[in-house]
Image (cartoon, rainbow, N blue to C red):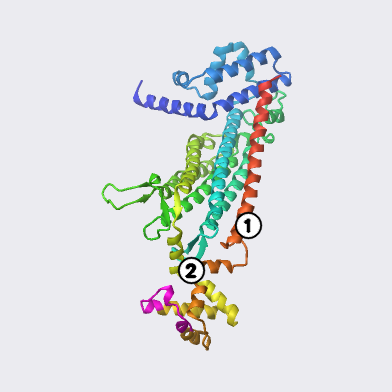
Amino acid sequence: MDALMQNYIDIEKKNLLYDYRHRGAHQTWINRAYAMMLTEQGLLDRADYQKIDRGLVQVQENLTEQELMAAPHGQDIYFASEQALYRCIGMDTACKLHVGRSRNDLYYTQYRMSLREAVWQISEEILETQKLLEEKAAEHFDTIIPYYTYGQPAQPGTWGHYLMSIHLCLEGDLGRLQRAYGCINRCPMGAAAGIGSAFPLNKERMAELLGFDGAIENTLMANSAVDYYLELESAMAILSTTLERVGSDLDFFATMECGILEGDKEISSGSSIMPQKKNYGPGALLRCRALSIYSSLQNAMTAAGSVTMFPVHETYSYFEDFWRNADDLIGSLRLLKLALEHSRIRADAALARARDGFTAATHMAEQLTMEIGEPFVKTHHIVGGMIHRLMDEDRLAVENMTGELMREESVKAVGFPVERTDAQIAEMLDPLASLKAKVTGGTPRPEDTRLLLETGQKKREENERWLAAARKKAEDAYRQVERGI
């Protein structure tokens, strides 16, 4: 055998092994349900049904990856399993299973069953991550940290509020996964090769026995739809942006320049040449692990959008990488949990950075507007004038924001002196006092964050119930197949 042919066979075997690992069990459930439906429709007698059903279970239990690799060239998961069933119960009986169907509707049903399993697993990891975020947020309602705009300290926030912001992003990601699930969880069985069958098959019964929400009515689209896959890949890619953005923040918070987050040594690394280095591991990993999922979505979009409405290889070739991406995404969610468990916010340093970064300056201008009745634009000029003057004099520090400086700058901005003591100005520039003044809801004010936590917990529990119900529907269907006729 020449090297080119061997390479071709190696590709086939690799795909066969991947399919068997990720769709072999689904194929068995489809076959068992299909035999049951054929019997109910009078297309298969009970004795043959029972023999086929027992044979399918034996094949699933006993077929090994070594046997698959030794199978003749040209076999895919369907033919490999069919041949194994022939060997197990004899061809005369086993061949009666293949009535009114094609590898097309069989495979597209497997794909959907595999994808819905991915939704379950990813959703479960998100929910577990949200639980940890809730736990950590409850400990840090009043732990001040600086919030940033365009990379500069902007206004004060809290670590608890920041964590609940991640929680809300993940809630949105769960919603997208659930909407994708609604598109995924429809059954193609009965479409055969795309135009249905002359045999009286029961498509709705197949959907019921496999735990789907219903059958796909249009036989062509049952085998050639791509939207269900693209919806899930899109949801996964958006979830990846959530994790990537959080990774960027954690990485920055842990830098020497920012210095408000400390990672345990278990999640940090040193340098082969620079002895002073302490590299925070999770942040960069969360960023770079997202890249393969983005490229996978782009590849799927390109493949799906460049072909006919009829089934072709491009409409399923992207499944070959799907579970690698799904596993990477699950791993990234676990990495975020690890980071949360093994990092601590340096509260004193974070408060000092928020204070010294003048993050309460906006509050100071707002308070002046309320107290002296001048428009915010003008009080903004008072505070801005004070800060810019200190910058020009190279004395920029919170303690240099004095009553005398306010009098001088207020005359320039509003035409009269605004009198405040140094102590009053210091209170205006206190980050926590700034937060406590907020009244619009959903803010880092500790009372608001408590409400965000309560709301988030309720929504998370609602999503847990959705996940449990989705899984139970499939499990109940499989039990029905297991009981048999």
Taking the magenta stretch, the answer to whether it contains residue 396 is yes
Magenta residues? 390-406
Say which amino acid is labelled 1: Leu
Counting from the top left corner in percent of width and height, residue 74 is at 47, 22
Q: Residues within 10 Å of mark 1 (few under 14, many from 20)?
A: some
Q: Position of residue 368 (x, y in %)?
A: 56, 78
Q: CA distance from mark 2 to mark 1?
A: 24 Å
- Which structural element holds mark 1? helix
Label for residue 359? 2
Q: Where's residue 96, x and y in %?
A: 64, 16
* Residue furthest left as drawn: 273
- Amino acid type, callout 2: Thr
Residue designated by label 1: 451
Picture residue at 56% right of the left edge, 43% below the top: 128
Task: Assign a secondary structure to mark 2.
Answer: loop
Residue at 51% over, 73% down:
427
Q: Residues within 10 Å of mark 2 (few under 14, many from 20)?
A: many
**Residue 328 x %, y %:** 47, 40
**Quadrant of residue 480 in the image?**
top right
Viewer-side residue, 95 vs 382: 382
Label at residue 63: none
In the figure, is residue 282 to the left or right of 466? left
